[in-house]
Amino acid sequence: MKEVSKKIILCYTLPQFAVGLFTTMLNNYLIYFYQPTQASGLPTLITQGVVVLGILTVIGFIKAVGHIIDAFTDPVVANISDKCKHKNGRRIPFMRWFAIPYALCSLLIFCAPANEPGMLNNIWLTVFLWGYYVFYTLYMIPHHALLPEMISSSERRVDAYTMSSLFFVLGSMVGYATTAFVSIFKSMGCSALASWRITFGIFTAVGVVLLLLPTFTIREKDYVQSVQPTVSLMASLKHAFANKNFTVLTVAQLLEGTGMAIFQACIMYYITDLLELPESQSIIIMASSIVGSLVLYPFVNKWAKNKGKKVPMMVGCAVFALSCFVICFVEQLPGTNMVKGVVFALVVSFPFAVLNILPGSMMSDVIHHDTIKTGVNQEGIFSAAKSFITKMGTSIAIMIVPSLTVIGAQEGENVGKTGLLLTAVVGGVICLISVAVFALYKEKDILSDIKAHKEKNG
C-alpha cells in the first residue's frame, strides 16, 4: 500500500469545509429561521406553537425524527459500505454518488414554497430535512470510515483530524457570517427571506465542489487493503458494543455532543434575546470564538500528542459546562453586552478547539485497536454504531429545545427568556456528566497496544 501523502490528506479533509457550512445552516439557523422572532424580519412559514402531542413544536418534532431516521440508517449504510465490492473501493463510490443530493437537500430545506404557514410547508420541510439526514449518512459514514483505514499511526491521525477540524471550523466560520451576507443582500433591496436563501444557495454551490473533490483525486485501493467482515449487521453491532472502551467513548461523546447541540440550536437567541444585540452583530461574537479556537489548535494538538487525548477532553467539557451556567447570569455581569458576548466567545473557544479535534481521533484509536485484535476491518460499523447512539441522544435534545424556548414567551413572540435560560442549564448539566464518563476510558491501554503492534510490524 502507498504511504498517504499530505496532499491526499488535504483532499480527504477539504469536504469538512462543506460539512461545516451545512452543519451551521442546520444547527445554528434552522430553528431561528422557522421559529422567527419579530426582529428577524422573517415570515412565519410553518405551523407554530406546541401542537404535537401537546408538548412539541412542529420544527422540534420534524428535526428530532430526522435525527432518529439518521441514526437508524447509519449502521445499515455502514454495513453495506463495509461489505461493498466496488472496483473503486468501499468508501469513495458512496461519496461520489451522494455528494450532490446531500448538498441540494441542505439548501431546499430553507426553500418552502408557500409564503404563509400551512401543511404544504410542513411537508416540504419534513421531506427535505429527512432527506438531508439520509444523504448525509450515505456520504459521511463512508468518509469517516476511510481515514482510520488509510492512516495507522495515532500521531498522524491527530494531525489529520486537526486538519479536518480546521476545515470544518473554517466552514463554520463562513456559516457564522450568514447574517453579514444576509445584511448585504438586504441592503441591495432583497427581502429578508430572499437574502437568507441566496446566502445558503452560495454556500451550497461551494459545498458541492468540495464534497466531490476527494472522489476524483483519491484512489482508495492504492492506500487501503481491507479484510471485509462476513457477519451480519446485528452481529457487527454486538461486536462493537462489546468493546468496553468503545461503549464508554460513545456514551461520553453522546453527552458532550448533546450539550453542544443544545447550545448551537440556541446561539442566535442568546445573542439577540439575552444580550439584546442586533442580528447583524452576531458575526462578531461567533468569529471571536472561531478565531480563538484556531489560535488554540496547535496547543491542543501538541497536548494530545504528548499527554493523550483523555484529559484535554475532560477539561474541555468541564469548561463548556461552566460556560453554559454563566449564561444564566449574563445580565448581572459587568460590561456592555458586546463585551460580555466576546469574552464568553473567547472562553468557549478552548472547548470548541478540543471538541472539534479530539473525539474523532479518540474513536479512531479504539477502532484501530479493535482491528489489531481481530484482524478484520469494521471501521464503518464502529463509526455507525457510535453515530447511532449519539444521534439518538441529540434527537431527544433537539426535540425538547423548541419546547423549552417557548416557555415565558410574550404574546406575539415565539421565544421566551425563561426558556432560553433553561436550555443553558440543561446543556451545562449534560456536558458536566460527560466529564465523569470520559474518566472511565482506558486510553493508556489502547495506545500502548497500538504502539507495540507498530513496533512489532515495523
Image (cartoon, rainbow, N blue to C red):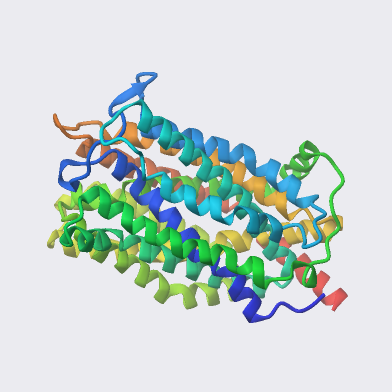
Which residue occupies the foreground of this view, 118 or 37?
Answer: 118
Which residue occupies the foreground of this view, 26 or 104?
Answer: 104
Name the residue located 53 percent from the left edge and 74 percent from the top edge.
Answer: 301
- Place of residue 341 in the rendered image (x, y in percent of width and height, measured from the top left): 23, 60
Which residue occupies the foreground of this view, 393 or 315?
Answer: 393
Name the residue located 42 percent from the left edge and 30 percent from the top edge.
Answer: 123
From the viewer's perspective, tell me whether residue 159 is left or right of residue 317.
right
Name the residue located 15 percent from the left edge and 31 percent from the top edge.
Answer: 412
Name the residue located 69 percent from the left edge and 58 percent from the top edge.
Answer: 145
Would residue 326 be visible to someone looking at this image?
no
From the viewer's perspective, tell me whether residue 292 is left or right of residue 135.
left
Give the tally of numbered discs: 0
Residue furthest top as drawn: 53
Would residue 298 be visible to someone looking at this image?
yes
Q: Quadrant of the N terminus?
A: bottom right
Asked if 68 appears above or below 345 in the picture, the reply is above
From the viewer's perspective, tell me whether residue 32 is left or right of residue 220.
left
- Place of residue 88 in the rendered image (x, y in percent of width and height, measured from the top left): 77, 63
Q: Quadrant of the C terminus?
A: bottom right
- Place of residue 176 in the rendered image (x, y in percent of width and height, measured from the top left): 33, 61
Q: Quadrant of residue 55?
A: top left
Asked if 44 appears above or below 107 in the picture, the reply is above
Asked if 222 appears above or below 176 in the picture, the reply is below
Which residue occupies the foreground of this view, 385 or 66?
Answer: 66
Q: Quadrant of residue 237?
A: top right
